Amino acid sequence: MNERPRTRHTYQNVVFDSSRWAGFRPRDDDVIVCTSYKAGTTWTQMICALLIHRSPDFPAPLGALAPWLDMRAAPIDSILAGFEAQTHRRLIKTHTALDGLPYFDNVTYLVCGRDPRDVFMSLQNHLANADAEQAMKLFVAGGADLSQPPPALPDDINERFRIWLTQGTFEWEQDGLPFWSHFHHAKTFWRRRTTPNIHFLHYADLKADLAGEMRRVAGLLGIEIDEAAWPALVKAASFEDMKANADRTAPDAQHRMWRSNSQFFNKGENEQWRGVLSEDSLNLYEKTTRARYDPALLFWLEEGARMAGDPKTS
């Protein structure tokens, strides 16, 4: 598809507002981490920050260094002013699908994929660990409309999964409640996978070969790293190190979003859904996803590039 990516939708709910991008001024070497929720966003940010700063010692905690631009937790003027003040290469976080983002030819977009079933399982830890009262105070201060608050979720995890698979937050989505669609997000970037400045990672590939994937990202970003520095950088990007340093690595820790910063990094494992989701739930997953989405996209989401092939060429 040769058509230039363009903004088609405005994503606005209690948590985030994609119109906050309106005042953003890109720089030629910006890196935008535009990953779906619970799909390796913080991991991708950490890898990029380590490469950009060539050290595990950042000038600020990761969440403050590379905040989620769309989220209502802080005034957009302060977020944009913070980015304008940065003199190093900038790293910007978003969970917005490509059809809600501005497209810039001079920046790098990094998308990380993950098995949707693992995304759902990680989301359950996210919801349990979130300080909902603190988050809601911030979102309301950021302009959130609570006339239609997020729906209450059932306790049964299989019923939650059914809702997540069959109900959407936005009219152009078919799934993702109570957040938004992991599938639609991936689809918007997948359709533009041959665009030169849009690049793909996958959670499973990072698990399988973190050092190799970090070197690949360094190549994508045009960053050279001294060989002697690599072991410390790879170690700092490991799940164990990020969890041990959660006060500086957990997203939005500066907003006190979590009951436990360390618990944000729950297990970091694949296939957590096995033995938890019922056979009926897994059958529903197969039925709904295969009817709605490109089989090649689903294969990549579920297996990663090592099994599915390079998304840039597949």
Image (tube, helix red, strand yellow):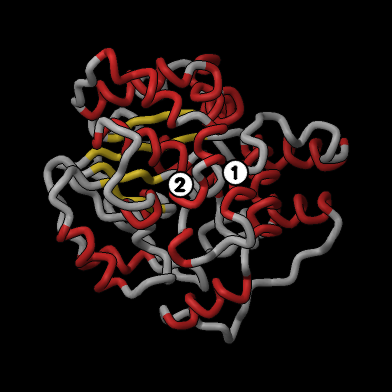
Q: Horizontal placement of 54 versus 172: left or right? A: left
Q: Nearer the viewer, residue 281 or 76?
A: 76
Q: Which mark is residue 265?
A: 1
**Residue 314 visible in rendering:** no
**Residue type at mark 1?**
Phe
Rate crowding at label 1 as few (under 14), some (14 to 19) or many (20 or more) other CA atoms within 10 Å: many
Spot occupied by residue 268 in the image (x, y as percentages of width and height): 62, 35
Q: Quadrant of residue 277?
A: top right
Spot occupied by residue 85 in the image (x, y as percentages of width and height): 15, 60
From what the image shows, is residue 85 above or below residue 73? above
Rate crowding at label 2 as few (under 14), some (14 to 19) or many (20 or more) other CA atoms within 10 Å: many
Residue at horizontal 38 percent and vertical 46 percent from the top: 34
Q: CA distance from mark 1 to mark 2?
A: 10 Å
**Residue 8 visible in rendering:** yes
**Residue type at mark 2?**
Thr
Q: Which residue is mark 2?
A: 249
Q: Quadrant of residue 312?
A: top left
Spot occupied by residue 124 in the image (x, y as percentages of width and height): 70, 52
